[in-house]
Amino acid sequence: MNLVLRKVVVLAACLVLVFAVAGCRSVPEYRCDQFPESIETPPETVAVFYTPGASELLVFGDCALARERFIPCSTFKIVSTLMGLDSGAVSGKSARLGYDGQKHEYEAWNRDATLQEAFQASCVWYYKKLVGKLDKSYVQRTLDRLHYGNAAISVWNRNGHNVFWIESSLLISPEEQVAVLADIFSGGAGFRPEHVAILRDCMDAGTVGDFRMYGKTGTGRNHNTNFLESWYVGFVEIPGKDRVFFAIHGADPKRNVASASLRETIAALIRQLGPILQKYAGYLPENGS
């Protein structure tokens, strides 16, 4: 499908947003377009694409939402996985933290699990335990280093079982999500390569068209509307070219939005954008043609 991307220039400024340079993140230009008519989305949906080296973000939907901060919910498991590995709280993909027998709403959570199984099932009890093993000052330093949204963990529970990433103090924008992912997978975030490789395996979501997709879902309740809103964030690997990182966030003031539906939305968009993403991963020319 031939999608014409119309350029929307966002003023560059030294804000805590995307693409860290000497400790400061500047705002890039956007290339904005609407979602293809064949792809249905909730009314408040934005999808952002970025590849290292490109001067622009590709944005679909409402461009203003690309900079709006939302609760990260289970997309935070990307960073907490790395912090768990980095700190020694977990030792690898097969690490178990011990199921306490409590019944949960999802059957996949009602059993012991490895790190990889917990990540792929988005198992909250496992990650509560994992984050509970981390030192608050270490978590704060890591989020500050990553420029992870507002980096706010003010509701830290010193008794463990922290949920500051679920409907609480921590917030991040789609623009910031792709910047964090790019930092992590480019080796610029300070994590050991073997730990990043474990995270990549945990994120593996299979093939989409000609690409391999990696991602993480996230769902939480918007307390203004009382409905669920969701994320799907990750990247695709393009053979012979750079990764293209993406973040999609969707909300509807009248109904719940499931993360699984956003995963399907981004997969459909990636299939339609195939040639454009390949060109983007090789970097767009100055005239954007």
Image (tube, rainbow, N blue to C red):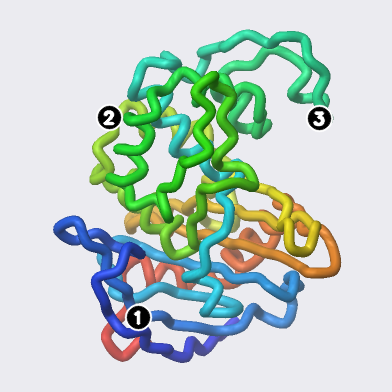
- Position of residue 106 relative to residue 188, above or below, is above
Q: Please tell me in which quadrant of the rendered image residue 159 appears.
A: top right
Dot 2, how many residues are within 10 Å of its Cα: few (below 14), some (14-19), or many (20+)?
A: few
Which amino acid type corresponds to the residue marked 3 in the rendered image? Tyr
Q: Residue at x 59, y 30 (%)?
A: 119
Label 3: which residue?
106
Residue drawn at x 79%, y 69% as measured from the top left: 253
Q: Nearer the viewer, residue 38 or 71?
A: 71
Dot 1 or dot 2, earlier in sequence = 1
x then y, percent, for residue 74:
60, 41
Residues at badges 2 and 3 in contact (C-beta under 8 Å)? no
Instruction: For marks 2 and 3, give the CA distance.
Output: 33 Å
Q: Gap in Å between the C-alphas at discs 1 and 3?
A: 41 Å
Q: Sequence order check: which comes first, mark 2 or mark 3?
A: 3
Tell me residue 183's x, y (percent): 31, 50
SS state under label 3: loop
Q: Which residue is mark 2?
A: 192
- Closest to the camera, between mark 2 and mark 3, is 3
* Element assignment for label 1: strand
Q: Residue at point 62% right, 25% down?
A: 118
In the image, is residue 212 above or below residue 159? Answer: below
Q: Earlier in the sequence, mark 1 or mark 3?
A: 1
8 over 201 or under it: above or below: below
Label at residue 29: 1
| Label 1 – label 2 distance at C-alpha | 31 Å
Amino acid marked by disc 2: Arg
Q: Residues within 10 Å of mark 3 (few under 14, many from 20)?
A: few
Q: Residue 226's image quarter?
A: bottom right
- Amino acid at circle 1: Glu
Q: Is residue 239 above or below residue 88?
A: below
